Amino acid sequence: MASSIQFSNLHPLSSLPSLTSPSPKPPSKSLVSFPLSRPYPLRLTPKPSAVSLVVRAVPKLSEADPLPVSSEPGSGKFPNGSGVYGVYDKNGELQFVGISRNVAASVEAHRSKLGAELCSSVKIGLVDGATPDRAALTGAWKSWMEEHIATTGKVPPGNEKGNNTWVPQQPQKKPQKKPDLRFTPGRHVQLTVPLEDLVDQLVKEKEVVAFIKGSRSAPQCGFSQRVVGILESHGVDFESVDVLDEEYNPGLRETLKKYSNWPTFPQVFVKGELLGGCDIISAMAEKGELATLFKK
């Protein structure tokens, strides 16, 4: 069926205006001193842009012939060039208009994913050129979309904003979490300031500090994991310190118990004061008190 569509013959180049002026007559020797071995061609009219040629080469949506999409994989004989295509359902309703560097592969992907109900036939308009640029393809797509909207007054369902049936949304990357703070560069480094003084300085300089078991990206106990989850869900900008990290925070666990007079972990400090552990943080979150606290 694909051979019945001769897009290259819709607007033969012979019907287009001349792209360049006829070669001028050689100027007389008395007026030109250029060496004969270095000709300087003269162009009187600018060459039309590639996009203008593309628009003339692609048929209108209403003029393109529909090609049936077979239910068998790989049996459809569609061109594999670059172009615009429109997919119709079994009732002949246009469902989606797309562009592709390989139309045949895109149509096959739609057929495989959505089946014959939504992919019953397809109209194809190839864009001239071996590798047409993005602007040329977009121009062809826009032309078909505008024609369909002008005729029906609506956008094809698959092209509506928020529709993920035809073009799946790319998963959003999770924001990178803050690294955990460390009190020393390593166990081999001898502190010149008592660790308790460093803890006191940290909790007073930083608005929210959570001392947890494990890292914030991989807590090592359920209570620490819950506290991290609550703080993150409330959008709290907090610092985290791993009390189990004896390489970079040696002795921190026992030091912190004495500093806060609180025997268990996690421990959350806000503006230099101990707010509490998992039970208190969870209760405040359930009552809405935590949200109120961090809105101030």
Image (cartoon, rainbow, N blue to C red):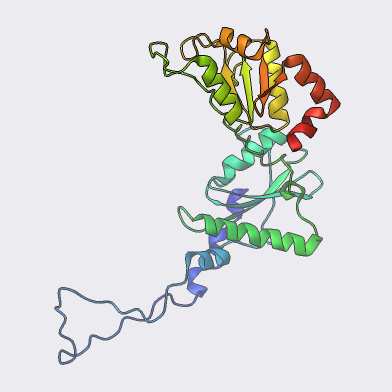
Image quadrant where residue 105 sits: top right
Residue 223 is left or right of residue 59, and the answer is right
Q: Which of 245 and 107 is in front in this view?
A: 245
Q: Furthest-right residue in view?
A: 287
At 67% from the left and 59% from the top, the residue drawn is: 144
What is the x, y in percent for residue 163? Answer: 74, 43
At 48% from the left and 64% from the top, the residue drawn is: 50
Q: Furthest-bottom residue in view?
A: 30
At 21% from the left and 76% from the top, the residue drawn is: 39
With respect to residue 11, does 115 lie above or below? above
What is the x, y in percent for residue 295? Answer: 75, 37
Image quadrant where residue 222 sits: top right
What is the x, y in percent for residue 226? Answer: 71, 18
Residue 161 is left or right of residue 258, and the answer is right
Placement of the C terminus among the 4 image quadrants: top right
Q: Which of 149 and 115 is in front in this view?
A: 149
Image quadrant where residue 193 sits: top left
Q: Nearer the viewer, residue 214 or 152?
A: 214
At 44% from the left and 77% from the top, the residue drawn is: 18
Regarding residue 10, the answer to whether it shows in the image is no
With respect to residue 10, does 188 lie above or below? above
Regarding residue 262, the answer to whether it shows in the image is yes
What is the x, y in percent for residue 244? Answer: 56, 10
Q: Which of 239 and 80 is in front in this view?
A: 239
With respect to residue 294, does 191 lie above or below? above
Total tally of numbered discs in the picture: 0
